[in-house]
Image: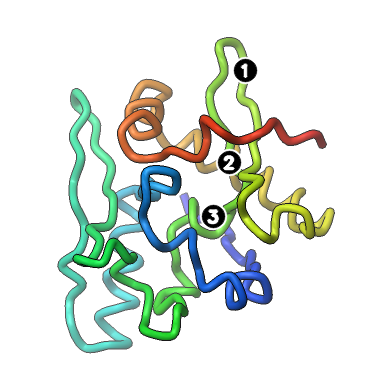
């Protein structure tokens, strides 16, 4: 399933120095599907002439997902020395829709927004609508138990986020 990821908050990311691409207990790792891993690998290999040996496979029962291994400085492997994403055109869906995320609730899917992101107060209605659509598509790529395992182990900001009102 190919999802249109043409969302960008670069005008906010550049002054922020891409804090969301710098792993901390708060930010965590993006969840990556097999298809995204392949797309990123192909793009990066073609552009930089080397295979990005940076994906870590996480197994959960019979399912799996990937996260990006981070550098020794806890930076995303794909963040260059000027804080720019080297895979902007094919970045993981979680990165494209940040600071919005869909999460499984007890009875429904809820949408949350990271209030620490400088762009969170400046999001256009168009961005919010596209991000909501893509967030819901993103969450449905994985079974609820797999997705919740990833949230529990690899992401921190969701616990401190606030519910997004449409």
Screen quadrant of the C terminus: top right
Which mark sits nearer the N-terminus, 2 or 1? 2
Question: Which of the colour schemes (rainbow, by chain, secondary structure, one colour) is used?
Answer: rainbow
User: Marks 2 and 3, how far apart in space?
Assistant: 15 Å
14 vs 20, left or right, is: right
Between disc 2 and disc 3, whose residue precedes? 3
Q: Which residue is mark 2?
A: 101
Q: Residue 68 in the image: x percent, y percent?
A: 28, 57
Residue at image x 48%, y 74%? 88
Q: Secondary structure at mark 3?
A: loop
Q: Is residue 31 left or right of residue 67?
A: right
Mark 2: give few (<14), some (14-19) or many (20+) Cα within 10 Å.
many
Q: How packed is label 3: few (under 14 Cα within 10 Å), some, or many (20 or more)? A: few
Front residue of 1 and 95 = 95
Position of 66 compared to 26: left or right? Answer: left
Residue 103 is situated, as x and y percent measured from the top left of the image, at: 54, 30
Q: Which residue is mark 1?
A: 108
The residue nearer to you, when weighing 137 against 80, is: 80
Residue ID at (28%, 50%): 67
- The tag on residue 16 is none
Marks 2 and 1, how far apart in space? 14 Å
Question: Neighbour class for label 1 at 10 Å: few (<14), some, many (≥20)?
Answer: few
In the image, what residue occupies the spot 39% across and 50% down?
30
Q: Position of residue 89 (x, y in %)?
A: 49, 74
């Amino acid at each position: 399933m190919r999802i249109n990821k043409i969302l960008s908050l670069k005008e906010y990311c550049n002054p922020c120095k891409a804090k969301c691409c710098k792993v901390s207990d708060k930010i965590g790792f993006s969840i990556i599907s097999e298809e995204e891993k392949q797309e990123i690998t192909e793009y990066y290999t073609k552009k930089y002439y080397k295979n990005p040996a940076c994906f870590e496979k996480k197994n959960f029962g019979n399912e799996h997902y990937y996260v990006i291994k981070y550098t020794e400085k806890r930076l995303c492997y794909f963040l260059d020395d000027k804080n720019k994403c080297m895979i902007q055109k094919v970045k993981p869906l979680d990165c494209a829709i940040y600071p919005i995320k869909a999460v499984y609730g007890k009875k429904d899917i809820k949408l949350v927004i990271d209030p620490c992101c400088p762009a969170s107060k400046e999001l256009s209605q168009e961005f919010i609508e596209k991000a909501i659509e893509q967030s819901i598509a993103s969450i449905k790529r994985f079974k609820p138990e797999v997705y919740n395992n990833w949230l529990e182990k690899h992401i921190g900001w969701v616990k401190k986020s606030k519910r997004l009102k449409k």
